[in-house]
Image (tube, rainbow, N blue to C red):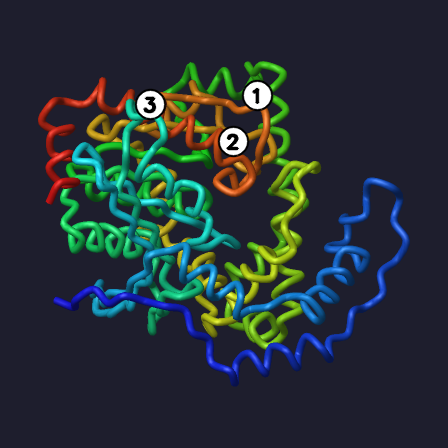
Amino acid sequence: MSSLKPYKLDVSSDLLDWVTNRVNTARIIPDIAHPVGEEWEYGIPTAAMEPLVEHWRTKYDWRKMEKRINETFQMYTVDLEESGEVISLHFVHHRSERPDAVPLIFAHGWPGNFTEVEHLLKLTAPEDPEAQPFHIVAPSIPGFTLSSSPSKAGFGLGKIANIYHKLMLKLGYESYLGQGGDWGSFILRSVALQHPSSLVGLHINFPVTLPPKPLSNPTTLFWLAIRYLTAEEGKRLKRMQWFLKAESGYSQIQRTKPQTVSYALLDSPIGMLAWIREKMQLATEESYNWDTDTVITWTMLYLISGSAGHARIYKEAMSETDGTTFVLGSRISNEVAVGVSSFPKDVGYATKWWAEATLAEKIVTWRENDKGGHFPSVECPDALISDVLEWVKAVKETSSTSKWDALLKAGRH
């Protein structure tokens, strides 16, 4: 098997020169006038793009950000085979010095990336000596940012899940925990379905699921049909419905013609910037201000990939057997202790009683936070960390002694 290789970002000067030239010669098209509060209705407005591009032209320093990433994250690559494909998987791996640490894999989605794990890295050495410490692993999805892309069609969520599982085994973690949102939540749910004896517990912050079935869950279906919801539950469900109806055009494009749209995005730094920045805006609190350097760095990481993988995952996920149909249509068994966090400005939602019927048999924690959106590890990391620590306590309390001991043993290997 392939060995682990330490990894440092070092983007070629030729690529940086190309990006700089494209940014300096970019055309920012004029917008139309919008009523107050509706400035983003037609997409990212010129008033938002102009300062971003000006900052990129005059102030942004990739080498400075590259140095920061290299100093912040302990990164590696490893070649892993799945279904005839060899993926050079990029990942972050920070081990705790505590003997009671347990392994946790953090799975990002789109348009995020591995840097979303930054605030969780302090869980390797929590300030509270009573808090559970973790060994943190954060892979980049194949085809996203710094991981290589599959060379053939058909590399769906189940195959990505198997790659993540193989990574954890390669690192010596035969038992482990998982945390994820967006595509990361789907990937780890697939791990839970395929490898429940290894994934002892799963925490997600993107609780989406299919409607209950009339034969197996008639009461839950009835409650959903009559909208047996609290005011807050109704508000969150309505937000998800709004997003699916009014804001999901990007996913329709990416799930039908991912290669075509990727020509435009990967050949235009400003196009990729607009594509990503718009979704960062619409899935977060209105009061949250994205750091400009962060926005551009996320864009750069996708440009570096040179791959349509970030778009292609939407098409691969349409597979009946290796996509969202399998994940959403399968209930996670009680072998896996599931924790759920919901954030009001996220765009996916289910109530606890709905999720208990269709998402997982064993939901050990459920937290509906009063602030935050689609990127909680960036927007409100303290809230997410609090939820994760509450969940891991419940995992320990509700799992068999042998399961928890297996986690500890994996952590001490």
Compared to residue 157, the image places residue 122 above or below, namely above
> Marks 3 and 2, Cα distance to the nearest angstrom?
15 Å
Instruction: State left or right for residue 328 relative to residue 371.
Output: left
Question: Which residue is at 52% across, 54% downward?
Answer: 111
Say what secondary structure mark 3 lies in: strand
Question: In the rendered structure, are the residues bearing label 3 and label 2 in contact, judged by CB atoms less than 8 Å apart?
Answer: no
State the image coordinates of residue 55 (x, y, percent, origin top left). 71, 64
User: Given the image, on which type of amino acid does mark 1 rest?
Assistant: Glu
Q: Which residue is mark 1?
A: 233
Q: Are marks 1 and 2 in contact (CB under 8 Å)?
A: yes
* Whether label 1 touches label 3, CB < 8 Å: no
Residue at the spot 66% in from the left edge and 53% down from the top edge? 278
- Label 2: few (<14), some (14–19) or many (≥20) C-alpha neighbours in 10 Å: many
Q: Secondary structure at mark 1?
A: helix
- Please state if 135 lies on the left or on the right of 14 as rendered: left
The span from disc 1 to disc 3 (Cα, nearest Å) is 18 Å
Residue 349, which numbered label? 2
Q: Amino acid at mark 3?
A: Ile
Label 1 vs 3, first from the N-terminus? 1
Looking at the rendered structure, the secondary structure element under dot 2 is loop
The residue under the point 63% across, 16% down is: 231
Determine the image quadrant of residue 363. Answer: top left
* One can see residue 318 in this view: no
Label drawn at residue 363: 3
Q: Position of residue 94 (x, y in %)?
A: 29, 49
Q: Quadrant of residue 189?
A: top left
Residue 86 in sight in this render? yes
Left or right? Give the position of 26 relative to 109. Answer: right
Which is more toward the observer, 355 or 265?
A: 265
Residue closer to the observer: 4 or 348: 4
- Residue 26 place in picture, x, y as percent: 73, 75
